[in-house]
Amino acid sequence: MPNSSGMHPKLLKADYHGSIMTVTQAKNPCLVGLSGIVIHETENAFKVVTKQNKVKLLPKQNSIFTFAVPLYSTLPATHSANVPLPLPSPVDPDKEVSPHLRKTVLDDPHIQFELYGNQFRFRAAERAGRKFKHKETIEL
């Protein structure tokens, strides 16, 4: 298991585009449980695409999000750093798809993190270049 104190600065400066984000708490109860792939991040919200192929805007203010990181690399064992991975082929929703193509990070062993939206109310580019001071907070 990785050291949690070393992960904090990395999580703070991370780019969450492409991650599967789930709302665990929100001021608006309709948003709780909503999950999707982050396609755009602004200062005040995450824009996600849900499994139903709908775009939803998740406000950061007064919300708590979770996302997962795999415990080990999911790249093929034969992968070389110099060779790009093949792009996935488009999936026809009417066709039956093999289960290994529907796999997400949540299907493998993973670590789950909580993000407090009030503390992430910065643009991704601002967050990456900024120095943050550690402060204890309690979300009510």
Image (cartoon, helix red, strand yellow):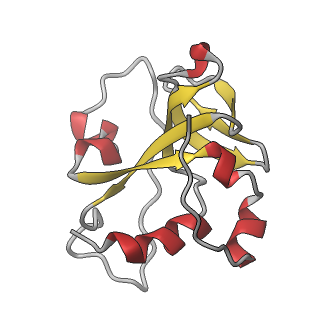
Which one is in front, 75 or 111? 111
Looking at the image, the residue that sits furthest to the top is 30
Residue at image x 30%, y 23%?
96
Position of the N terminus, as image quadrant, is bottom left
Q: Reply above or below: 20 against 31.
A: below
Residue 124, quarter of picture:
bottom right
Residue 69 is left or right of residue 61, and the answer is left
Q: Position of residue 95 (x, y in %)?
A: 37, 22
Residue at image x 58%, y 70%?
134
Looking at the image, the residue that sits furthest to the bottom is 82
Q: Reply above or below: 128 against 32.
A: below
Q: Position of residue 109 (x, y in %)?
A: 20, 52
Q: Reply above or below: 109 against 127.
A: above
Residue 45 is left or right of residue 29, and the answer is right
Which one is in front, 139 or 2? 139
Residue 10 is left or right of residue 27, and the answer is left
Which one is in front, 22 or 86? 22
Number of marks drawn: 0
Position of the C terminus, as image quadrant, is top right
Residue at image x 69%, y 78%?
131
Residue at image x 64%, y 74%?
133
Q: Position of residue 45 (x, y in %)?
A: 73, 40
Residue 28 is left or right of residue 89, and the answer is right
Q: Position of residue 119 (x, y in %)?
A: 65, 53
